Image: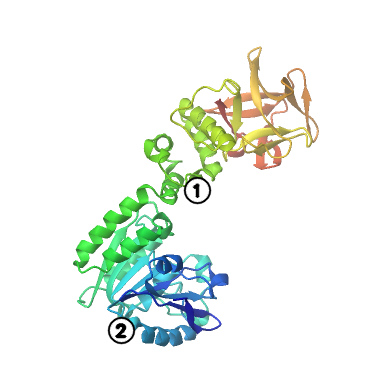
C-alpha cells in the first residue's frame, strides 16, 4: 500500500504506511529535514521494503515536536495505532526526545531512542546556545518529565558525549520506585551525538527492532542490543571515522596502526573516511613531529596514491622513485606549504592538487644552511623575500629553514618568519608560533 498523509499542518506532518505486520513502528526523524517533511520520514525505505506498518512523524519547523498541532496529531496517531499487537517508537536526537516524551500518551510498548535530548529549555537543563535559541516562549517547560515515560525504553548513546550521557542518566533516574517503566542504557562508543550514523543499514535497523521488541527480559534485551551495536560498528565507516577524528591528536601512532590494519582494509565505503583529507595530513604532521617519521612518510604516500588511483594501501607501499627523498612542509593544519608563481606568495594547499598554480615548497642544504626551494621544469629555484612579494632566484636567497624543536620555520634575514594565515594568505611574523611552524617530511 502506498503511503498516505493522515495529518498535516504548518509544522507537524504524519505519514502512514499500512504494511502486513501485526506490530506498528512509530518514528520521529531528527531536525534538519524540515524541507522534506511532506515526503520523507525516518525508516521509510526500510519499512516499505519489509512491508512493516509504520507511522512516520515529521516537522516543518525546528520545534522538537512540541506544539499545539502535535497534540492534535497525537489523537490521530492514537486512532491509527489501535488494533496492533505492539507499538514500537523510534527517534533520533530531537526525534528521540519526542519518542520518549510521548511514550505515555501513545502507550508505546517499546521505545528505541538514539541520543535523546532532555530539553532545549535552558531553564530546565544545560543546553548548547544553538539549541537554546530555538526554544520559544511557548516551548518553556518542554523537557521530558517523570510522568511522560512509559513502557520499555532503550537509550542508545555515546557515554563519552557529556550532554547525551546526562540526558540518558536523568531519564534512567525517572524509573526509581516505578514498576511500569524500564529503561536500559546501551553505550555506542565513538558515535558522538549522531549515534544512528554508526549503526545504519536496513538489516541493522530491523535487527534492533526485533531484539528490542522481543519477549526476553529487559536486561537480556539490553545486553543483546549492546552486542549487536558492537558488531554493526566494526564495519561502519562513520564509526571508524569518529574514532580517528576523536583520537588522532592524542594517539597518532595507534591511529596509524588502525589505518594499516586488515580491519581498515576491509571497511566498506572507505571514501567516507578518507575524504576528510585534512585529518590525515594533520596526522602525518603529528607523527613526524613525534619522531614517527616512517609512519608519517607512508601515510603521506598512501594519501597521494589514494587521491591519484583511488586505492589506499598503507600496509604494502613500495618505494616510489619519483617522490623518494623529496622534502615537503606541512603547516599547522596538515596542508602543504606551496608557492604561487602568479601571486608571488607562499600558499597552503592539498598536496595532491595544489590549488591554483601553486607548487610544493621543498628544501636543499647548501654550505651547511638549509634553504627553501621550489621546482619548475625540473630546476630548483630559491624563494627570496621582497617588499610585498616573493621572488625566485637561481642561487640561495634571504630565506632559510631553521629548526624549532621538532618542527621547522622559514626565517628571513630581517628576523621575520613565514606565517600561513589561511589557504591563500601568507604573511610575516616576529615570532615562530603555531602558524609559523611546519612539519618537514621527507617523502
The residue carrying mark 1 is 272
Q: Nearer the viewer, mark 1 or mark 2?
A: 2
Residue 117 visible to the viewer? no
Left-right relation of 386 to 313: right
Q: CA distance from mark 1 to mark 2?
A: 43 Å
Q: Earlier in the sequence, mark 1 or mark 2?
A: 2
Q: Residue at the location (20% across, 62% down)?
A: 220
Closer to us: 206 or 134: 206
Q: How is the image coloured?
A: rainbow
Left-right relation of 42 to 373: left
160 relative to 330, above or below: below
State the quadrant of the C terminus. Answer: top right
Residue 275 on image: x %, y %? 54, 45
Residue 108 on image: x %, y %? 31, 77
Closer to us: 433 or 292: 292
Q: Tell me the quarter of the picture where residue 340 sits.
A: top right
The residue carrying mark 2 is 83
**Mark 2 closeness class: few <14, some 14–19, many ≥20 residues within 10 Å:** few
Amino acid at each position: 500500500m502506498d503511503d498516505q498523509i493522515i495529518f498535516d499542518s504548518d509544522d507537524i506532518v504524519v505519514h502512514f504506511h499500512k504494511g502486513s505486520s501485526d506490530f506498528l513502528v512509530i518514528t520521529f526523524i531528527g531536525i534538519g529535514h524540515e524541507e522534506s517533511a511532506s515526503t520523507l520520514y525516518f525508516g521509510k525505505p526500510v519499512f516499505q521494503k519489509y512491508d512493516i506498518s509504520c507511522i512516520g512523524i515529521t516537522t516543518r519547523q525546528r520545534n522538537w515536536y512540541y506544539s499545539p498541532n502535535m497534540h492534535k496529531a497525537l489523537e490521530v496517531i492514537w486512532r491509527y495505532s489501535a488494533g496492533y499487537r505492539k507499538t514500537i517508537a523510534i527517534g533520533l536526537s530531537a526525534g528521540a526526545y519526542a519518542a520518549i516524551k510521548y511514550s505515555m500518551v501513545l502507550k508505546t510498548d517499546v521505545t528505541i531512542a538514539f541520543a535523546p535530548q532532555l530539553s532545549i529549555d535552558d531553564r530546565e537543563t544545560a543546553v548548547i546556545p544553538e539549541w537554546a535559541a530555538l526554544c520559544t516562549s511557548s516551548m518553556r517547560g518542554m523537557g521530558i518529565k517523570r510522568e511522560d515515560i512509559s513502557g520499555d525504553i532503550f537509550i542508545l548513546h555515546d557515554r563519552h558525549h557529556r550532554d547525551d550521557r546526562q540526558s540518558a542518566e536523568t531519564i534512567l533516574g525517572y524509573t526509581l520506585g516505578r514498576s511500569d517503566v524500564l529503561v536500559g542504557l546501551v553505550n555506542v562508543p565513538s558515535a558522538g551525538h549522531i549515534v544512528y550514523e554508526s549503526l545504519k543499514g536496513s538489516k541493522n535497523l530491523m535487527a534492533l527492532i526485533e531484539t528490542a521488541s522481543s519477549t526476553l527480559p529487559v536486561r537480556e534485551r539490553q545486553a543483546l542490543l549492546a552486542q549487536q551495536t558492537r558488531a554493526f560498528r566494526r564495519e561502519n565507516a562513520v564509526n571508524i571515522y569518529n574514532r580517528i577524528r576523536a583520537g588522532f591528536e592524542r594517539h597518532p601512532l595507534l591511529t596509524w596502526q588502525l589505518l594499516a590494519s586488515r580491519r581498515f582494509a576491509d571497511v566498506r565505503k572507505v571514501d567516507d573516511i578518507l575524504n576528510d583529507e585534512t585529518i590525515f595530513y594533520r596526522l602525518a604532521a603529528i607523527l613526524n613531529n613525534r619522531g614517527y617519521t616512517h609512519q608519517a612518510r607512508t601515510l603521506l604516500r598512501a594519501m597521494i596514491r589514494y587521491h591519484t588511483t583511488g586505492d589506499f594501501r598503507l600496509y604494502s607501499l613500495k618505494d616510489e622513485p619519483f617522490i623518494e627523498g623529496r622534502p615537503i612542509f606541512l603547516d599547522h593544519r596538515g596542508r602543504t606549504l606551496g608557492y604561487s608563481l602568479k601571486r608571488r606568495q607562499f600558499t597552503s594547499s592539498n598536496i595532491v592538487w595544489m590549488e591554483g598554480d601553486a607548487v610544493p615548497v621543498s628544501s636543499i642544504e647548501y654550505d651547511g644552511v638549509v634553504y627553501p626551494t621550489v621546482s619548475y621544469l625540473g630546476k630548483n629555484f630559491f624563494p627570496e623575500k621582497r617588499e610585498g612579494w616573493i621572488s625566485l632566484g637561481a642561487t640561495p636567497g634571504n630565506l632559510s629553514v631553521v629548526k624549532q624543536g621538532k618542527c621547522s620555520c622559514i626565517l628571513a634575514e630581517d628576523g621575520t618568519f613565514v606565517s600561513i594565515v589561511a589557504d591563500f594568505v601568507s604573511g610575516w611574523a616576529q615570532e615562530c608560533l603555531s602558524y609559523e611552524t611546519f612539519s618537514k617530511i621527507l617523502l
